[in-house]
Amino acid sequence: MRDHPPRLPSSPGFWRSPLRGPWFTSVLGLVLLAGITVLFLTGLVSYAAYNPDLSRVNDQTPDKGILGFYLFAWPTGPVWLYRFTQGLHVTLGITLIPVLLAKLWSVVPRLFALPPARSVAHALERISLLLLVGGGLFEFTTGVLNIQLDYVFPGSFYPLHFYGAWVFFAAFTAHAVLKAPTALRAVRRRRREEGDLVSPRPEPPTVSRRGALALVGGGSLLLFLTTVGQSLGGPFRRTALLAPHGAADPGGGPNGFQINKTAAYAGITTADTHREGWRLIVTGRTGTVRLSRAELLRLPQHSASLPIACVEGWSTADQWWRGVRLSDLAALVGHAGDPPDVLVESLQRHGAFRRAALRANQVADPRALLALYVNGEELSPDHGYPARIIVPAAPGVLNTKWVARLTFGDL
Amino acid sequence: MPSRTSVTRPRPALGNPFQILLLACSFALAGYAGVRLFAGDWRAVALWVAGAALLHDLVLLPLYTVADRAVLRGLGAAGRREWTPYVRVPAALSGLLLLVWFPLITGMTAGRYRSATGLSPDGFLARWLLISAVLFGGSALLLALRGRERGRPRRAAKRRPPAVH
């Protein structure tokens, strides 16, 4: 009985799609090679943007060791820098999901291939593929869940996604080195398809290989078009139909732009921020000063047009902030001319970034403000009333809201 | 000659030594990061890494393969195999959106979403359904139009002479 259908997925005849073959897998693999390289690099950039080497309070991964070898002082310009790199990271990641799924589908027969190992090298490669597939899916899954505020993963997002990225990247690099030459050859020379991925008893095709690629590309395009608006802002936000910060802005008016965490979520009450009770405590070389909001308003006021850009990939267009320069506040406590680093503490009682450190270059930038007004109005409670930090090009979470204390000096 | 006797003796194949060195290097780096990845709740993290691969390979992939074959078989039984893309494409795209955005679409994070962002969590399901309606509706329209285009000359020739109307 020649045509008896094989029952086990370890038999090559079990897999019957006529699409599978080196060309299809190679095209998808090369797209992922470029895409995941960009994801990894923008991820490293985002990690550096937090200035984790500046202070313990910025560092969610104190055991990083050599993995932070490339860290540098995050610049303050161009002001859209983090908006761009992190919007790219998240939007590209979402756009690549169909390519990743199609790539995994195209090579699934190999998962079941027997014998388990033909040689020592082959055995090692199959173990490495477990890290590649498991690590890759882990990275995509934690990222996609985190931007939807679905914190079901086992631990804090930052260390999981960061260390997971390095595990994945280790396997990814080896895989790329081993496979990229073959993939390039398979794409360039479209000879007769042969190899273990080609089904020995293919079913009649229902779609061409190009048609299948078009479906994958269409899926990517659909995800891209329904997501990218949350990173472009303005009129484009409405086009991000399914992205977490798409479709709508909260409320209207000058304070009607995207919020990361509301006052209620952060546990901030009106008793904390009451005009009479609230004082900003500024400490530096010459001691401590306590400033009410009225006293802050009597200091020189400056404006800056700056965006809010979140690690979750969404961002706002530039908002018009008004308040006191951080360098002026540093000068008040004995750091005139050479502003040092600063530790910023919020009224927030919980949350990973209720304390955050800014580097001297950020404090010194004339656009770095302790903002009291936005778009011509007092800050709303959700945007940090009575006062918040706004620093050009910094990740959103370092723009501390509901500021209670600034401590200038070496951290 | 000693070398000839060693060839006849069975031994495990080593494979490409460059590949072995490269993978050893990769494992060392993965180990360095992995120790840190597993520093917390290592059982849960291992479950997630292995679970992600197993869930994909043994649940998600077979699930959509079986669904696709069911569509193929159903249309094949009806003698309409050529309709497959008209069902497959909108179903795949709609399913893809659900796969990526299911926490928002199902509302499983609705409480946290509303309280953190100040935005309404209610629109996601409706928008996903509307996008799906457009995808399936557009596909149906396309199928109807193509069917008419193809059917027209044949039917006209078969049924009645063009002079009748």
Image: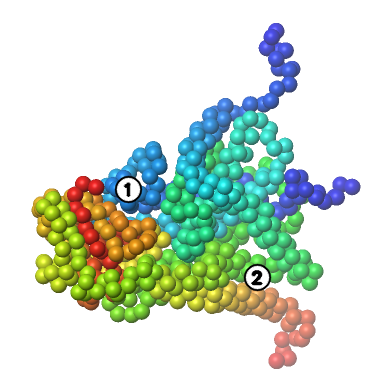
Chain letter of mark 1 equals A
Q: Is residue A277 above or below residue A73?
A: below
Farthest residue in the bottom direction?
A: B165
Q: Quadrant of residue A372?
A: bottom left
Where is residue B55 shown, x and y percent of the image?
63, 54
Q: Is residue A55 left or right of residue B65?
A: left
Where is residue A63 shown, x and y percent of the image?
40, 42
Q: Is residue B63 left or right of residue A308?
A: right
Label 1, on which residue? Answer: A56
Separation of marks 1 and 2 at Cα, in angstroms: 56 Å
- Front-lying residue, A59 or A246: A59
Where is residue A214 shown, x and y percent of the image?
57, 60
Residue at image x 23%, y 60%? Answer: A405
* Label 2: how many Cα within 10 Å (few below 14, some 14–19, many 20+): some
Q: Quadrant of residue B5?
A: top right
The label number, if any, that marks residue B86 in the structure image: 2
Residue at image x 37%, y 67%? Answer: A266
